[in-house]
Image (tube, rainbow, N blue to C red):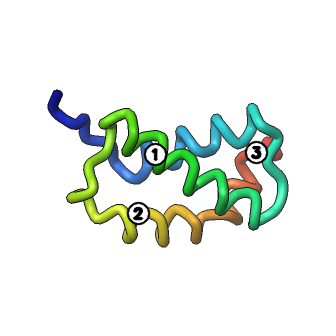
Amino acid sequence: MDNLTFSEEEIFERIVEEGMMQGIAGEEAYHSLVDEVIDDMLRMGELDEDQNIESHLIHLKARFTEFERRSQE
């Protein structure tokens, strides 16, 4: 099965949706959610280890303030 290609923005949108459904509050919980979503996407073959996952994790975790703002809308 070929891996799908997701932009970092698409992954962030998934994190926002999941975070709102779970009622995520606080930066530590957000960081755990980012790890969980990325791990799930890797396990399901939606992402590939060759896609510079560490860079995605760093960038996505740095977007906590944006996540917080979006989840309060």
Say whether disc 3 or disc 2 marks the residue closer to the N-terminus. 2
Query: Which amino acid, mark 3?
Result: Ser
Quadrant in which residue 27 is drawn: bottom right
- Distance of label 3 from label 2 (alpha carbons): 20 Å
Q: Quadrant of the N terminus?
A: top left
Q: Position of residue 37 (x, y in %)?
A: 53, 45
Q: Which mark is residue 56?
A: 2
SS assignment at label 1: helix
Quadrant in which residue 49 is drawn: bottom left
- Residue 38, compared with residue 52, is above or below; it is above
Query: Which amino acid, mark 2?
Result: His
Give the residue pinned by disc 1.
Answer: 11
Tell me which residue sits at (52%, 62%) in the image. 60
Say whether disc 2 or disc 1 marks the residue closer to the N-terminus. 1
Q: Nearer the viewer, mark 3 or mark 2?
A: 2
State if disc 1 and disc 2 touch (CB < 8 Å). Answer: yes
Q: Nearer the viewer, mark 3 or mark 1?
A: 1
